[in-house]
Image (cartoon, rainbow, N blue to C red):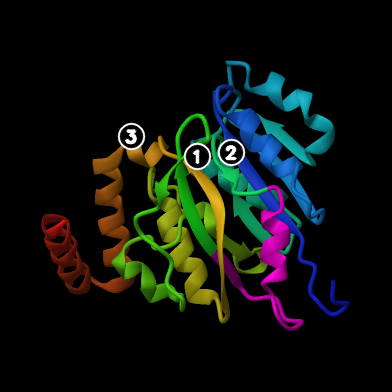
Amino acid sequence: MHNNRPMPKFSVITVTYNAAGVLEDTIQSVISQTYHHVEYIIVDGASTDGTMAIVDRYRSRIHTVVSEPDKGLYDAMNKGMALATGDYLCFLNAGDCFHEDDTLQQMVHTLHGTELPDVMYGNTAIVDAEGHFLRMRRLSPPDQLNWKSFRQGMLVCHQAFFAKRSLAVPYNLTYRYSSDFDWCIRVMKKAQSFHYTRLTVIDYLEEGLTTRHHRASLKERFRIMSRHYGLVSTLCYHAWFVLRAMVR
């Protein structure tokens, strides 16, 4: 490895609530990373199933564990962020995994120069409950990312979006399902440099909170887009989304 290559520290944050069925794969995918500048933080919302028994089994490999009631997913993410000390934040939900054991190592290998980019991002594979590949995520990341990119939708999956901790803002708790979309835009508005790794970074478990609350999530996204991009622009893009769906 080059001596002047940056060696960023990653803070990987997993938020859980009654996730005993899917959490173990996620934990194993983090603790088996070949890159070692990683701190792992688990924020649990006082689960009543076997979630904490699984966490306890791996506790020696997890830097910080919190288990207490919270005000939902994004409140727990804010807690995790407040505990993080790394250069980059990565929010890996229970059920989601890094694509390979050396994913973080590969990401670092794509970095050039001595300056760390403000945002690193990559591709996302959709997998089933057994971890079998189903397809790549429908929206794919652009070569050149900026805050206006998300006018076209969330082109980078939240889990594959690594933001510098110094740029991070708290999640807006008024959004229940799509605060991650708003968060990424707000981070990108502050970011000066973006780095596309061109790697498949995340295996995303098909069934997520947003999938289950699809309509409510879409309404929130419309509000978020109107706030950042203006109502007229957002209406125009949504007309295009509908046309695109009909053509498909």
Taking the spot 40% from the left edge, 63% from the top edge, the residue there is 140
Foreground pick, 144 / 182: 144
Residue 111 part of the magenta-drawn span? yes
Number of dots carrying numbers? 3
Residue plotted at (63% across, 37% down): 26
Quarter-of-image position of residue 40: top right
Contact, mark 2 vs mark 1 (Cβ under 8 Å)? yes
User: Which quarter of the rendering shows the N terminus?
Assistant: bottom right
Amino acid tagged 1:
Leu
| Tag 3 residue | 212
Q: Secondary structure at mark 3?
A: helix
Q: Which residue is mark 2?
A: 15
**Residue 172, visible in the rendered structure:** yes
Which tag, 2 or 1, sits closer to the chain's start?
2
Callout 1 environment at 10 Å: few (<14), some (14 to 19), or many (20+)? many
Point out residue 187 in the picture as x, y percentages from the top left corner.
Answer: 52, 68
Return the residue at label 1. Answer: 73
Position of residue 113 in the picture relative to residue 130 (left or right): right
**x and y, in percent, of residue 145 in the image:** 46, 75
Q: Amino acid at mark 2?
A: Val
**Residues in magenta, as a range:** 101-121
**Considering only vertical position in the picture, is 122 above or below 78?**
below
